[in-house]
Structure formats: structure tokens, C-alpha cells
Amino acid sequence: MKKVLSGNSAAAYGSMLVRAEVISAYPITPQTKIVEKIADLIANGEFKTEFVKVESEHSAMAAAVSASLVGARTFTATSAQGLLLMHEILHWASASRTPIVMVNINRGLAPPWSVWADQTDSIAQRDTGWMQFYCESCQEVLDTMIQLYKVAEDKDVLLPAMLSEDAFLLSHTSEIVDIPDQEKVDDFLGTFDPEYKLDVNRPMSFGSLSMPHQYYYEFRYKIAEAMENAKNKIIEVERDFEKVFGRSYGGFLDLYRCDGADIVLVAAGSMSSTIRIAVDEMRDKGHKVGLARLRVFRPFPVEEFKKLAKDVKIIGVLDRSFCFGYEGAFFTEIKSALYNMDDRPLVKGYVVGIGGRDVTLDVIFEIIDDCMKTTDTKEESFKWIGLKG
Amino acid sequence: MGLKEIRWHGRGGQGVVTASELIAEAAILEGNYIQAFPEFGPERMGAPIKAFTRISDEPIKIHSQVYTPDIVMVLDPTLLGSVNVTEGLSDDGILIVNTPLGEGELRAQLGFNGKIYAFNATKIAMETIGRPVANTSCAGALVKASGLVKLENLLDVTEEKFKEKLSQKAIIANKEAIKAAYEAV
């Protein structure tokens, strides 16, 4: 069934389609409409779920971890300051191996206050042990939610997953979304039934003390291993999803006109679609430009980047976030992934769109132009684009 | 058709975003692709706001804001003195305004050389709905002035969109408002 849905509504419908059994969330702009839409769906009898009202995001995530530990399929959503407040419990979620799926609306962090698109909030959760996905359209938000439960609940993965979408550019933008049949989603996902869970009839403890000589070290290794396992699972689920639902998003790296490209731009989120238009215009003029949309940030697609880099001269990386004291996170990590290649391309970094500054076609053309003008192939530059004087 | 961009001006609480979505939903019925979004930011009752609709016969890729709309629709006449409603609108564009003023007076006030449609949406809303809610009348006028979607499709999506929120009587009144505005421009 096709409907006009915003990115927020798509997330709410996603939670209903996967039959989330427990939802615990605290409203925050621009995520509020997710919570409101879920409340509507519950109120009109369409959605049977346990909605846990909480007084903060810290509690929202704590409730989600608990619900997931008893074996309930669990959903939550937040944004920016709310995500930061959850930070402690994000580690609890991954180390408790609870496959919670959370939608985060990428929004700037205060001060000064900003409610607009900025990926610093989720990038700052890089090391929490959560998988991280970035979406480009409202349809992708809905479809990725279904995929994420399948990946997260796999017995070889059992890790939480965060789906990020840009504030307003997706959260409040209505697009045509095809809502898949409930039966198909049920068949695809199955039910969540973890081998180990909190159960009064089969008592066991979770998260108790582990001394240095005991198994803390090994538990951490198991998380690292699970992230590696997730790599194959993400590809497998994407392939199976396409067979059933007829849509796919390129797995880790969504490559657009990268065949024979000299210059490839890398970006995540909604600006990718604007880059597609720029790529088309450049190709029409005979310039070999492509886009590699970074869809999955954790686990990081090292092999995919190496494969892409073999035939490319320049990779231009667009970061909608900044790690103070160094550079954009995508820029750093892509360079790191390519470091051991014998013949690697030049990688250039660009900061754009911080705090919702619009990433227009002109911004993209400026970056492509900067890449094209590069003659010194050893020059590793990093720039903030469009700073006001 | 290519890509058409509409900018809606109104105030928080007047149903501006709903109007932008109604036109988008009608366009889908005709096999077109759409985007509809409000001005990016917190919305306050009574404060000037904008909303946007993009319609195209091809999938819409762009995810940045609208700077050069093809059509501007002004739902609230009191905005004219304080908001630059013709910003980015070229002389090839269309300006539609809910106003008690005539086209000549409006043109003189705004200094706009393109096509202008002036009509009294608030009056139509009072006569049909009984309240000064001009969003559906404005959608009706936009359909006539732009030719982007068919009147019957706007009426159908209005019925569909409002059926859970409004009484059948109120839905009929809104459809009457749409039809009256369609005839008025």
C-alpha cells in the first residue's frame, strides 16, 4: 500500500510492521512525530504494543534494555541531546547483547541551540558497540527498520542497531512510501526468541561483576566478533530483502555511477540524493564523477572501500560532523581503511551542512570542482565549505 | 512536466502543511512523484511559516530547500507587509494570494510582474466551512491556477485525509470550499 509518509511516520509504521512488543521513548524535536504517530496507531487500535512512558532518554534506553533482556522485540527513537543522555546505557545495550533498534534523528548539538541536520550526535556514539546505518529516503527508513531487526536478532550478531535520518530533510519531509504487506514482513522476520533471556523459570544473571582474571576481556572480544559477523549478515539480509520486497540499497556502500569514475564523492544521509543530481550533470558534461553513499558506518566497510579505491583517482569525503582537534570522522576512517593499499587514491575531506546549513547543488559542484583542480596527488587537504566571513 | 516547486506562506495553525500535502497526494494519483515538507524548524501558533511541495513526473532526488519556486501561494493576507512572498519567484512564476484586494492593487503593492491570482479564500471559507480556515480553498485555487493536478483528485484526497479527523459534514464543507475557490480564480 502506497502512502505519503514523512521520515518520522515511516519509522512509526516500521515499528508497527516489525510488531515491536515494547516501545519506550521520550519525545524530542525533531523526533516527536515518531512518538505521536505511534501513540495515534495505538489509540486507533491498529498497533498492539506496550508503550512505556519515561521521564528521560536515559530511562527510555534503560527500559528498552530490560524489555529486550526478557525477550521482547524493542524499539525506541531519539535525537541529539536525547541520544547523548542515553550514552551510558548505549554501552549497556550492546554489552548485554540486546538487539534493540533505535531511530535517531540526526540533529545539531547545543549550544547554541540547533534542531537542524547534523550527524555529530550519532558519530559521537561510534564506540558504543551499536551498528550504525544512515538513510537517504523515507522508503529506505521503513525498509531498513525491517532489515535491522533481522540482522540485530541473528544469534551470531545480537547487537543493537541505530538507524539515523537527517533532521527535517527526512524526518519532516513527506515522500511516497510503499508499506509492505504485514504477512510478508512477518514471514521475513519471524519472532524474536533469544536463547538466553531473563526468565523466572530459568534464572540466570546478566551484567554482574567480572574480575580481570575472569571473562570481561572475552566478553568484549565476543562483541568485536559479533560486529564482524554482522558484516556478512547485513549483505545476506539485504539480498533476501530484495528477493521478497523488490528493493535494495547497496548494502554497505551504495555505489552510483562509480564505473570508470576518476572522482568519487562519499557522503551519508539525505545529501546523497542531491549529489546524485550533481553526478548526473557532471557525467552529461563528460566528467567521470560518481557517488559512494556510506550507508553503514558500524561495522565499517573496509573491504568495500578498498575495492572502490582500486580504480579511482580522488575520493572526496563529505562529513556532516566534525571531531574537534582532528577532522571529519568519515574522512579519517576512510583514509585509515586505505592505508595499506599499494596504490591508493588521494582522499580529500570536506565539512558541510553542520547545524542544518543547506547542502545545495552549488555546494556539491564547489567540492567536485575542488577535486578536479587537484594536481598535486600527494596533497591531503581538509576544508570547511561555505564558511561565512 | 519536469520538476515543479510550490512555496506556501501562512501562519502556524492555519493548515499550511496540510494544504501542501493535499496537493502532493493528489499529484500521486496522477502517477507523479512528490515531496512535501514544512519550513525546517519549530512551529508556533500564529507565527509566519512556510511549507513546500515538489511535484515531478520523474523520481525526485533533491534533498535541499526550495529557493526558486514556480508557484507561491499566500494563505494569509496579513503576511504581505512583513514577509517577502515573491522572493526567488521569477516573472515566469505564478503568485496566488488570499486577499480582499483586487489583482491590480495587489500587483502595485508587491511589484510582481508575473501571473497573479487574487481571490478571497477567507470569505469562501466563512461561507462554506463557517470558520476562517483558508487552507482547503487555497488548495482549490492552486489547482485551477497551476493545472498541476485535477480537481477531482484533490477532492478525493481531501475526503481520504480528513475522514479520521473531521465529521462528514465538515468534510463536505471543505470540499465545497475547494470547488468554490476553483471557480473563483
Image (cartoon, grey):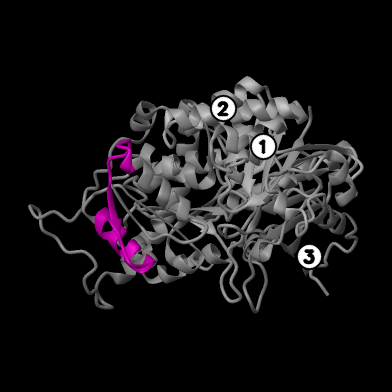
Residue contact at pointers 3 and 1, CB within 8 angstroms: no
What chain letter is assigned to the residue under label 1? B
For the residue pair A191 and A156, the one nearer the viewer reads as A191
| Distance CA(mark 3)–CA(mark 1) | 40 Å
Residue range highlighted in magenta: A42-68
| x and y, in percent, of residue B23 in the image | 64, 33
| x and y, in percent, of residue B134 in the image | 62, 41
Residue that badge 1 annotates: B138
Q: Secondary structure at mark 2?
A: helix
| Distance CA(mark 1)–CA(mark 2) | 12 Å
What chain letter is assigned to the residue under label 2? B
Amino acid beneath label 2: Lys
- Residue at 38 percent across and 61 percent down: it is A26
| x and y, in percent, of residue A24 in the image | 33, 56
Does the magenta segment cover residue A384? no
Does the magenta segment cover residue A58? yes
- Residue at 60 percent across and 37 percent down: it is B125
| x and y, in percent, of residue A371 in the image | 84, 57
